[in-house]
Image (cartoon, rainbow, N blue to C red):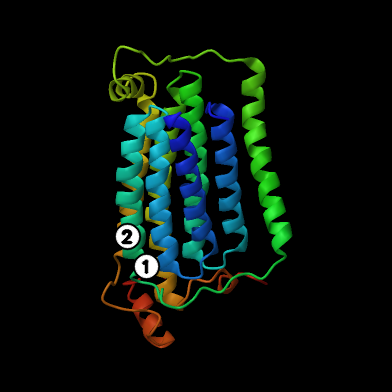
Amino acid sequence: MFEAIAFYLFAFLTISMFYITVTTSQALYALTALAAGMIFISAFFFILGADFLGAIQIIVYTGAVMALYAFGMMFFDTTRAVKEKQGNKYIVVGMSTFAAILVVAIFAAPMLASNPTALYPIASDIGNTQAVGMVLFTKYLIPFELAAVMLLVAMIGGIVLAGKKMDLSLSVMSEADIDTLEENKKVLS
Amino acid sequence: MMEIGLNHYLILSTILFAIGLVGVMRRKNLLLLFFATEILLNSVNIAFAAISHYYGDLTGQMFAFFVIAIAASEVAIGLGLLIVWYKRHGNIDLDTLANMKG
């Protein structure tokens, strides 16, 4: 009963927030609506009993990713309204819906047909966080380490890409100045 | 109606994925295109968590964790590239990224 009420409430909220994100012409509205949608999605994880995943969703998505987007938007001109591609709206919506149904059907149909059994069943006597830790550090240890290396590479790449010449704005400099800078190997072209 | 099953979550995931695809198709601004890809990744995460719950298997949650890690690194690298492009050209519209056109 309460699960159904919570599901429909948060489904409505999430869909409306993401709808605002893809339709608004103001980048700041899109950012705030996306952050709210991420929070509402974590509610589904809590309903589904994936407590640790819900906490990670709030911390990583709304904490780290959204903060990074907010910092990134300080570089861009976000007060200007965004121009949109003027295509046929019905073709876009129809193709998107078709593609989404196709993706879900491709992944769900073999699963429903073969009636799978759980490889790593959720132990009932321990909490979700402990169960996640036990599976993550035994069966998924190598992917976990690879993800750690990938995050390190992403961090170094982000620093190298965004951190160069923070005091200069290449968009207001003349081309000749940029060329002399590039000859001195001081800027990433 | 009142009993929430796996199909409810899969339908919700489909709707969110469609919204994200609409965003990917009609957005011209690269930053808002990134927002649409975040919606795609999140809708898949919902499906993973729901399947993990209804089959009693933790593998779905594991995959959701790795999807979140990939999303975080994608944002770091993509935003860095976007900042470099914006410093150089003054806008981040997709139509201006055509300087490799013959």
Q: Residue furthest left?
A: A167
Q: Is residue A123 visible in the rendered structure shown here?
A: yes
When the figure is inspected, residue A22 is found, relative to residue A42, above or below; the finding is below
Q: Mark 1 highlights which residue?
A: A73
Residue under the point 29% across and 15% down: A126
Amino acid of disc 1 = Met
Q: Is residue A145 visible in the rendered structure shown here?
A: no
Residue under the point 52% across and 34% down: B47
Chain of the residue displaying label 2: A
Side of B35 where A74 appears, left or right: left
Chain of the residue displaying label 1: A
Residue under the point 51% across and 73% down: A82
Residue B54, percent from left and from top: 50, 22
SS at mark 2? helix
Dot 2 or dot 1, earlier in sequence? 1
Residue B16, percent from left and from top: 55, 46
Decide which of A189, B23 is in the foreground and name it. B23
Side of A128 where B99 appears, left or right: right
Side of B86 where B98 appears, left or right: right
Asked whether the beta carbons under mark 2 and mark 1 sit within 8 Å of each other, the answer is no
SS at mark 1? helix
Q: Which mark is residue A121?
A: none
Are discs 2 and 1 located on one and the same chain? yes
Q: CA distance from mark 2 to mark 1?
A: 18 Å
When the figure is inspected, residue A146 is found, relative to residue A22, above or below; the finding is above
For disc 2, the neighbor class at 10 Å (few under 14, some 14 to 19, many from 20) is some
Residue A97, percent from left and from top: 67, 47
Side of A67 where B56 appears, left or right: right
Amino acid of disc 2 = Val
Q: Mark 2 highlights which residue?
A: A160
